[in-house]
Image (cartoon, helix red, strand yellow):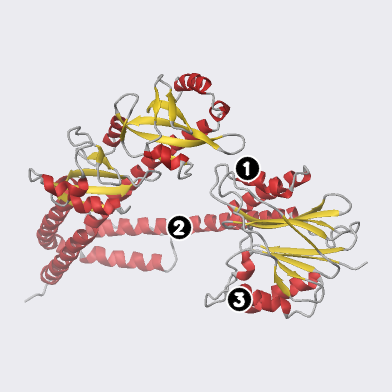
Amino acid sequence: MLKTIRAKMLLGFGLMLTAVLSLLGYFLYAEVKGTVIPLTQEFSQEVLRARSAGLGNLFRGYLNDMRILSRDAVFRGGDMAAIQRELAHRMLGINPDYEMVFFADAQGQYVGSIGATGQVADRGYFKAIMVEGQDQVISEPVVSRATGATVFVVAAAVTDDQGQRVGLVAATVLLDTLSEIAGTIGIGEHGFGWVMDHQGLLIAHPNDQLRMRLNLLHAGAQGYQGLEEIAQTLARGEGGVGTYRRPDGTLFATIYNPIPNTPNWGLGVSLQETELMGRAYGLMRALLWGMAAVMAAVLVLVFVVSGRIAAPVRQLAQGVAYVSSGHLDQRLEVRTGDEIQALAEDFNRMTQNLKDHIRDLARVTAEKARVDGELRAANRIQASMLPRLFPPYPDIANLDLYATMEPAKEVGGDFYDFYPLDDRRLCFCIGDVSGKGVPAALFMVIGMTILKNLVRQGQPLGEVFVQANNLLCSENDMFITAFMGILDATTGELEYVSAGHNPPLLARAGGDFAYLDTPIHLFLGGMEGVGYHSSRLTLSAGDVLFLYTDGLTEAQDARGAFFTGPRMVAAINALPERQVRELIGSMREAVAQFVQEAPAADDLTMLALTITAG
């Protein structure tokens, strides 16, 4: 019955392809429904997160403007007449978003850049800065006492030379300006942006009939369905996607996200639900119709081309076998004008792509080798920056010191340093930069350099850390924990200060190691204006001081268990040898035995020093 290739292919291939395409159509439909629609929502959320971050950066810019103004000597001086002249002068070149810039003294009396004066002591932002001690504030919407317009206030504390708060400097931004900015944020052709404060009040919206009048947390009372749930989620500081129905029955999809650097305000973008999901639904319909058309066309094409398939198939099989044996330069020459030729051309492209991939892989491998070489060079450079001559200064009598630093990666963020201040005194320090790799190593170099320069200027040790902290706070997202000491080797007097670093261990002559009583201070680079105070003690002959970074106590074995502080104290007290070089070597062995084959999770740095007899 089915004696011809055409008949067999028409029946067998046609039925099989019909079944395959039917199943494929079903799975593709399910995949689009389960993946494309969620991806559409997720993409929209990502777009809004980026817009929220951009709006947050705008508010951060407002805060930075006020912080810069708060450091102006005129404002810090408190002369209201001079301040008013300075405000009028500053207003000429300041951000056009600001309606007015003003200064309020400690009693709440203010003068503004547009000549306005008055009293703001009862304002929430004034109390937040002058009573509660906040450094910067963005207020909720208020009615300006200078112009009567609805604004929000961006304010920063002003302190005098003694650090006492003498008032605040602030700017007012019209809510109309915020609405204009939110109005430029949209998704789709008809999407519109809006902003809600932490109490649910709609403070920015293209429709001025809703702005400052509609509270989203109580929108149900005004005929909105589903909007209260969106507002409740946003008030909790969470983003998401939701739908609501207006009083006229129109269904809207809403993407919403908190705005950074604001008092828990939220940004939302709303558009009709069909506009957001219409393309996904259209894709599913087109997919179903497309699969049906393909199935019909395949049945016709199988009948037409089945008689021409057998010969080219054999030719194709022979060519593929030759290429599969390793001859990637071989090209298949099939000229049938149908799918067989297309398959041959695709196979030719595949072999070319494979050749290109092999070539690219060789290039990438060479590039990786180059980068590895550069990182090894960086490791050598970093190691050369740390002092490595031990004992370090034979001219300083009665002192022995030894230190090591082992980075977790090719370069690290831990460091140690020591250098003589004169023929009796030695300055030493140890530190740990947050983060790993090249960025941490670069920040480590900056921190080492700043500390060394400040110490060698002869400033008190506490002041050295104050100035170093202020310098390291400038536009960075890393910080340094550090411990520094200045030891008089002749008297044994030690002055030291710690900035958030692990407390050292001290063993008096013949005694056990115990934690050194170290006052707690904030790490360097965390916040400007932090105070640091040094402590003192006297070391005697035979006393040993042991410094380390958290790479010691937080070393992990293969199960994730930490070495811990108690295990460190027990291990060091169990050592029979108190010579500094041998002590550090033994502690390295103790850590190595604990972690076994587990890779290092953090840099490991140790420094030990002792006062020797005679």
Give the foreground label among 3 and 1.
1
Q: Which mark is residue 357?
A: 2
- Toward which corner of the image does residue 35 lie, by quadrant? bottom left
Q: Residue 504: x and y, percent?
A: 69, 65
Of the pair 454 and 295, the residue shown nearer to us: 454
Mark 1 falls on what kind of element?
Answer: helix
**Could you tell me the amino acid type at mark 3?**
Val
Mark 2 falls on what kind of element?
Answer: helix
Give the foreground label among 2 and 1.
1
**Could you tell me the amino acid type at mark 2?**
His
Task: Identify the mark nearer the N-term, 3 or 2.
Answer: 2
On the rendered structure, is 591 left or right of 140?
A: right
Q: Which mark is residue 76?
A: none
Instruction: Find the distance from the CA under tag 3 to the CA under tag 1.
Output: 37 Å
Q: Is residue 417 above or below residue 71?
A: below
Task: Identify the mark nearer the N-term, 3 or 1.
Answer: 1
Q: Which mark is residue 595?
A: 3
Give the residue pinned by disc 1: 471
Q: Residues within 10 Å of mark 3 (few under 14, many from 20)?
A: some
Residue at x 74%, y 53% (from the top left corner): 385
Answer yes or no: do the residues labelled 2 and 1 have beta carbons within 8 Å? no
Q: Residue 172: x and y, percent?
A: 37, 30
Q: Residues within 10 Å of mark 1 (few under 14, many from 20)?
A: some
Q: Residue 263: x and y, percent?
A: 36, 45
